[in-house]
Amino acid sequence: MSVQITTLPNGFRIVTEAMPGLESASVGIWIEAGARHEQSEQNGVAHFLEHMAFKGTARRTALQIAEEIEDVGGYINAYTSREMTAYYARILKPDVPLALDVLADIVLNPAFEAREIEVERGVILQEIGQALDTPDDIIFDWLQETAYPSQPIGRSILGPSAQVSSFTEGDLKRFVGDHYGPGQMILAAAGAVDHDALVRLAEPLFAHLSPKPARPVDAARFHNGERREDRMLEQAHFAFAIEAPDYCSEAFYASQVFAGALGGGMSSRLFQRLREDRGLCYTVFAQSGAYSDTGMITIYAGTGGEELGDLARLTMDELKRAAEDMSQAEISRAQAQMKAGLLMGLESPSARAERLAKLLSIWGRVPDISEAIARIDAVTVEATRDHARDLLTQSRMALALYGPITRAPRLLELSERLAA
């Protein structure tokens, strides 16, 4: 398997990785524009735009977009994150040209018809309502907003209902005009693909686009803070975060290993201590996420209101203890989980195409998988403990609570427990 990259004169990037033996391919366009690139009055417009891409173009109706891909047995979808928007399709090898033509059409030529805008507005408002009715989803939006208050990176990807209700065709076109330049786009494909053939297909679709300068985003600033929403629910939802390294940091892999050992599986410390030993919860996990200039280690648990106080305090105790006595066995297990997850994911052309786009965006190149494996293996017990102690002494933490939370300690108490 080999990665090939071509950059057109206007900055449009094409990256592929052929996977011998496959009869299918994943093809997508990743755009370096997400919720983080919105102004405050635009919050939710990147996600709205993603929805509108499927509502018709100058050449195709919404039904034709779906039919052309599904008539050949394919699948087409999209997503919006805080730093990227992606439009992608999974198809058989002979249908790669069709998929690319459809993707280029919906990204470059959305119709933005007034009726379709109103229809999709209703769909998105339903999506927002569904998220608000799902506590173990909305708690993470609240945690993000608490950690990064009054910042684009802290805002919800879906946006507030009142704002979504007011977006116009002009708002959508303005965001496209500001952020959908060829230099912000990456065409990534994996599986049964031929790089040179894909470049030839892409050139007439994208080479004519005029370059646009990338607009800078506000630097992320992690703040101490807490949000508490007392509601009559069956469970109390606990989400705690500590600022962690960005994805270009030397400490990135140590942070990933530490989070994995702390709460990455059934053998992890938090799972064993909180669920298996004490029976305080059904779900508990820790994970480390990263952005271009910041990151978060997040701990989540769902528990009963009566147990919430014990769970919160015991979580802090385990977090503090892990920074002092994390063992080689725990580190090795977390490393094995990371490597297995990485390698298993690469068996999917969709996951591989996404990896190509993200790494090219981050690094300007696609490091070989062996490089990632080597960096995971290079994390030592000492490095993990040192990193964990650094995290716990920098005092940047956030807390979000939802449900029957009257017994929950305040963030100050939790931070003092970590510092004691």
Image (tube, grey):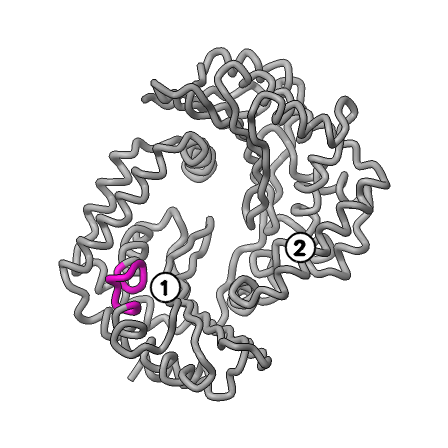
Residue with the most extreme right position? 114
Count of numbered circles in the view: 2
User: Which residue is label 1 attached to?
Assistant: 285
Within 10 angstroms of label 2, few (less than 14), some, or many (20 or more) residues?
some
Q: Is residue 206 left or right of residue 91?
A: right
Local SS, label 2: helix
Q: Residue at x 52, y 67 (%)?
A: 143
Residue 29, can we see it? Answer: no
Res 163 label: none
- Secondary element type, mark 1: strand
Image quarter in which the C terminus is found: bottom left
Query: Which residue appears at 49% of the width and 65% of the height?
Result: 222
Report the span colored magenta. 261-271
Residue 403: x and y in percent read 54, 78
Depicted 326 relative to depicted 190: above or below: below
> Where is residue 388 drawn, in percent x and y?
28, 65
Q: Position of residue 104 (x, y in %)?
A: 64, 25
Q: Which quarter of the figure has residue 322?
A: bottom left
Residue type (three-letter) at the residue carrying disc 1: Phe
Q: Which residue is mark 2?
A: 127
Q: Amino acid at mark 2?
A: Glu
Give 55 or 156, whichever is nearer the viewer.
55
Q: Quadrant of residue 1?
A: top left
Q: Is residue 43 magenta?
A: no
Earlier along the polypeptide chain: callout 2 or callout 1? 2
Which x, y percent locates residue 42? 72, 52
Is label 2 in contact with label 1 (beta carbons under 8 Å)? no
Q: Vertical placement of 278 versus 325: above or below?
A: below
Callout 1 environment at 10 Å: few (<14), some (14 to 19), or many (20+)? many
290 in relation to 417, above or below: above
What's the CA distance linking mark 2 and mark 1?
A: 25 Å
Near-viewer residue (191 or 357): 191
